[in-house]
Amino acid sequence: MTQAIAPRARTLVLLFLAAVAALLVGAGPAAAHAALTGSDPAQGTVVDTAPTQVSLTFSEKVATTDGSLRVLDPKGKRVDTGKPANVSGTTYAVQLHAGLPDGTYTVTYQVVSEDSHPVSGAYTFSIGAPSRTSVPVSGQEVGGGIVGGLYGFGRYLSYAGYIVLVGGAAFVLACWPRGTSVRAVQRLVVSGWLALTAATLSLLLLRGSYTGSGKVADIFDLDLLGDVLQTKTGAALVSRLLLLAAAALFIAVLFGAYDKRDDEEKRDLTFGLAIGGAVVAAGLAASWAMAEHASTGLQPGIAMPVDVLHLLAVATWLGGLATLLVALYRAPADQPVEVAAVRRFSTVAFGSVVALVATGTYQSWRQLGSWSAFTDTRYGQLLLVKIGLVALLVGVASISRRWTGRLAGTGAPGSRATVAAGVGAGVGGSAGAGKTAPAGSGGAGKDPGTGTKQSQKHATGKQDAGKQGAVRAGAGRGSGEEPGDAATGAVGTERAAQLARQRAAEDTARQKRLRDADPHRFGLRRSVLAEAGVAVVLLAVTTALTSTEPGRTEQDAKAATAASSSSSSSGTGSSSGALTLDMPFDAGGTNGKGVVSVDLDPARAGGNEMHVYVTRPNGRAFDVPEVKVALTLDSKSIGPLPVAPDHITTGHWSASGVQIPMAGEWKIAVTVRTSDIDQVTVSKNAQIG
């Protein structure tokens, strides 16, 4: 049965890894956590005179450098004077050269939000009248490419390493003290420490390029590394490395001095190790809380401790689960995990889930702010996926609890033989009474141990033969026998080594039969494996959540953008045009949602200048394959009058000389095609003339 299950386990692991890779690749560049909520001049406006500065307002404070805010003329030449200044609150401005000529100017920005994520974007405004520009606005996002992928993988690896390190140590201390002597468990915890350390060092090196140029060559730029060390994220990563040094000492004591103590002495040392380990684990969790979502926004003083508790609960549950899985599959037959240990972990895991739900509920409220954000924002959609995975994980865990209960019913709660999978009677039962089994199969006839004894005798005979061959070979060499005799001795030595390998393989197979003989333990192994698989995908979704713009921030940015558009369109005679109409659309498919804005200047009978802007729901400009406009005056049966604007730059189309024959209430319809098969038409009525 073990041979049949092993391919299944490998298939499950491959499927889970594929799902993780798909989630990590599909996540794309890190979404902006500090959203652009306003600008002066505003996006798409036409000002009569050249401004002296350009200012941008974000939803939170950001970090800037000399190239963070740039203003480019129609030919792509930089016309700003240098590093932006924080003029007030979350508003940053850069001065412009005097005497700028008429035309369309491009504003690009690339900053780092307060929660450590890079933010970038671009928009255009015009002086005097719009013009063609040679500045490409697309491709302004940071956090993508090879460096972005490596950085995302490093974040995932750091979370995984932390969970395995903390959860494995907690499982051993709280549930299975005897597990400190199991080599597989030792390797698991040490692997968690190594993964977290390697990921932290990698993140330090990648950080400068990740938030800047995105070039692979800049990864080992020492100047960039020095700049990173001066930031909040750099300080958090360095703090994590220092705490990992303390964690290494903790691991050395746990699997060294603590492991060599007897059970009574271990009980005396457990409390001290638990306190020290909890302090180190909480400190490591705080290195995330102090630099990411919890450190900014609403109620950071409460959010940071809650985030630390959330990470500790996740690590205790999922890391303990990984350790239990290793113990069930890799622990030697003479060192099985006891049923009592499994039951203790079940209690610990339940407490972790309660803490996880409580802290997760607070975090969800803090990051979303409304029920609509669950479906209207990417953060909310990912959170729904995470909630579903947690529910699935709890469901599978309940199955594991039932298997544990059945195991407890087959032996004493503290018995080591209970989870040893039939070291005694279980093996005989699996062989079957009264049936003949092959030698070494674990049973023959009515005596469960007969087959084993015959196998042992057979192996002993082979061992004696191997020894005799080795002795003869040595004697031949010592007495000066002919080369043919030496060759015979070498063959005997090779035969002895072959027999030793065969005995090792038989011993491994016998241990597997012992582990798999008990169906209750076998069922527990399968359910725990399923739990671990779901946990891998859950961790990938959680990593994606930490690099996604919170729903509350995204919706606040939308509201601020809408208010800015409404304000700019309400002022008659303003330089931004006489009429602005904003129309949300949903064409379905990928990138099917957004807002199309139509500016008409001077919005009266005769010739008019028309500008059309297409933005995502978060206010960021993006291109679609086609935009068409039609004007209809129903009261006079005029129209529809088609307008085909020219594409100017990303998300911006323009048409000059649009003739409106007479004043009246015109219907302005815009057709937006987002793909070869997806398009939608939206319209609004407006008084013109």
Image (spheres, grey):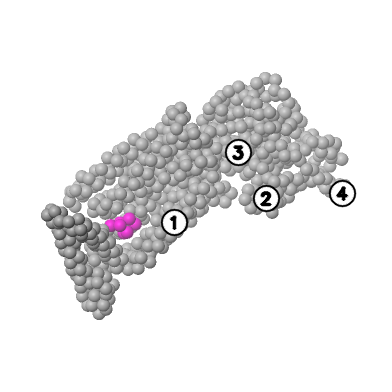
What segment carries the magenta color?
A: 325-331
Q: Nearer the viewer, residue 235 or 197?
A: 197
- Of mark 2 and mark 1, the one earlier in the sequence is 1
Q: Which residue is mark 4?
A: 637
User: Do the residues bearing badges 2 and 3 touch, measured as CB atoms within 8 Å?
Assistant: no
Q: Nearer the viewer, residue 302 or 403?
A: 403
Q: CA distance from mark 4 to mark 3?
A: 44 Å
Please report the residue visible at 39 percent of the width from the left and 49 percent of the height from the top: 314
Coordinates of residue 492 in the picture (x, y in percent): 21, 60
Which SS type dominates the magenta stretch? helix
- Of mark 4 and mark 3, the one earlier in the sequence is 3
Which element carries disc 3, helix, strand or loop? loop
Which element carries disc 2, helix, strand or loop? loop
Badge 3 crowding class, 10 Å Cα cut-off, few under 14, some 14 to 19, many 20 or more, is: few
Please report the residue visible at 20 percent of the width from the left and 55 percent of the height from the top: 483
- Compared across the picture, whether 54 is left or right of 355 comes to right
Q: Which mark is residue 139?
A: 3
> Is residue 170 within the magenta segment?
no
| Furthest-bottom residue in this view | 434
- Of mark 2 and mark 3, the one earlier in the sequence is 3
Q: Nearer the observer, disc 2 or disc 1?
A: 1
Q: Which residue is mark 2?
A: 675
Which element carries disc 1, helix, strand or loop? helix
